[in-house]
Image (spheres, coloured by chain):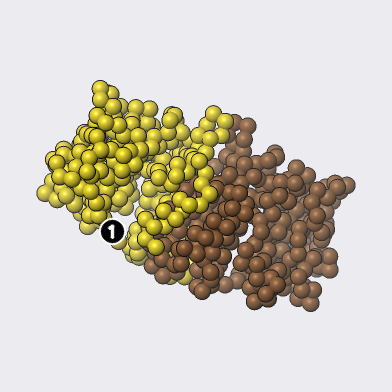
Chain colours: A yellow, B brown
Amino acid sequence: MTEHEFLAALRTLPLHKGARGLKDDCGLIEIGDETLIFNHDSMAEGTHFRPEADLADVAWKLVAINLSDLASKGAEPIGVLFGHALGGNDRQFIEGLRQVLTAYDVPLLGGDTVATTGASTYSMTAIGRATCKPVPSRDAARIGHGVFVTGTIGRAMLGFEGDKEYLEAFNRPRPQIDAGKQLAPHVGAMMDVSDGLLLDIHRMARASELSISVESSAVPVAQPDRRGECMRWGDDYELLFTLPQGTQLPFPATMIGTVEPRGSAPLYLDGEAMADAEGLGYQHS
Amino acid sequence: MTEHEFLAALRTLPLHKGARGLKDDCGLIEIGDETLIFNHDSMAEGTHFRPEADLADVAWKLVAINLSDLASKGAEPIGVLFGHALGGNDRQFIEGLRQVLTAYDVPLLGGDTVATTGASTYSMTAIGRATCKPVPSRDAARIGHGVFVTGTIGRAMLGFEGDKEYLEAFNRPRPQIDAGKQLAPHVGAMMDVSDGLLLDIHRMARASELSISVESSAVPVAQPDRRGECMRWGDDYELLFTLPQGTQLPFPATMIGTVEPRGSAPLYLDGEAMADAEGLGYQHS
């Protein structure tokens, strides 16, 4: 099954209402007045990192990509649980964990270790507490909203390619926890940029059942002569969000487009209809 | 690093207080008057299941082993998140998930899928709500407590070996959720039997800093002429617990030993000191 078919099949299972139909990045559980937010993301050798990768970087990134999803919900992280495949450079992994948990002041809540054969997969569940309600989702874009992105897009791509200036951007992405908390009370839709900016915009538009028009020249990219690649590569872990007109920007970000009535495609790039998600994000090894 | 070394290194990381020093099976988060309970366990191809296994069984067991840890805390399951390695018989996996989630009335809260190369690892976080406080732990055995186990031990071993009567016991273990809830308000220590009864008793005694004396003839085993193997093989997912003297048994179980002052070994088996954990549980493929 493709990931798309698998996800469609999962939606036929008994779902928690906080799973939001598996159409969002995180699950929610309401406990009294609090809303807890859960994210589960894994990293697989050969798919998300190279066999020769420093496992300290892998551990950092594993935590970072999970916290990035919490950030897109405006959540305050509470703790993480992880599944560890023993047998790589486990000391490096531990040191990377120590660095990222310390940097983001997030404690370890538990986990398990398994002996595996062949390529390793590391998994994680991150748990956070909502700082505002409603918790932001990717389906709350509304006609007339401006579309914004934090930071600069394409940095991870350049780091992956070996550009020393951007190695950190690829190996040690920085989840936008503070930005998420500041933005959450004001945004329409919000999500993190993980699989490619254009693909993520396409998904936001589809979830919101609207169209989003993007002006590519407005997108802040790390290498302007490779603007198209920067907008498609992903792994940047910036925040993509919409704001109602007239809202003062609560956190530095760049306006790159507008939300419009539903047209023939979820995404219009420089006026061109992009109906198909194919080619908007990269599957990178 | 060995699993033991890895765990020791993990304990030097920033830990949530609900991680209980990583000495217990689950992590706890207190939210208002509620205590949420978290467990993360993975299953790896070649280690926890055979490459030719029916993935419906694997999905069932993945949920069951996670719920079993919640059961040992007397928890009511709330939901599960999982990490799925695409590329096996994904339809079988979905159907197994459907069966186990329906059987235990536990909804899916989220998860992720990854493309992997080689052997597959499936991971899960199960989330539950404590039904009584304090939440049972493995370190609360006290001198004079009786030591009990639910069910019959060694059934999974026989199932693994192909005994048709016990195939289900190995492939589709039944987490003792109801037993756990009924026992939790009364027990001293409690944990599930996952890695071998004797090994788990050894761990309970060590955590409680006491000795436990076991009468092997009292242990309910599936094949009495292989009593030693039954007590060491594991994968049974029954509950092991201690009860203060004079407590009426709140759920059917068998008394197999007593908690005694700390001696030269954590475990005395038929009077023989078993200082070392080696040989008390099986690593099975």
Q: Nearer the viewer, residue A209 or B84?
A: A209
- Say if B171 sits above or below A207 in the image: below
Category of crowding for the residue at label 1, using alpha-carbon neighbours closer than 10 angstroms: few (below 14), some (14–19), many (at least 20): some
Q: Is residue A233 left or right of residue B102?
A: left
Q: Nearer the viewer, residue A20 or A74?
A: A20
Residue B253: percent from the left, percent from the top?
A: 80, 56
Residue sitting at x 25%, y 55%: A278
Q: Residue furthest left?
A: A225
Q: Quadrant of the C terminus of chain B?
A: bottom right
Give the image location of residue B93, x and y in percent: 50, 62
Which residue is painted at 25% across and 43% down in the image? A266
Res A272 quadrant in image: top left
Residue type at tag 1: His
At which x and y percent is residue B276? 69, 66
* Residue at 50% from the left image edge and 73% from the top image edge: B51
Q: Which residue is mark 1?
A: A284
- Counting from the top left corner in percent of width and height, residue B273 is at 78, 66
* Residue in the foreground of this view, choosing between A224 and A272: A272
Front in this rendered view, residue A123 or A137? A137
Residue B184 visible somewhere in the drawing:
yes
Q: Relative to A241, is A197 above or below?
A: below
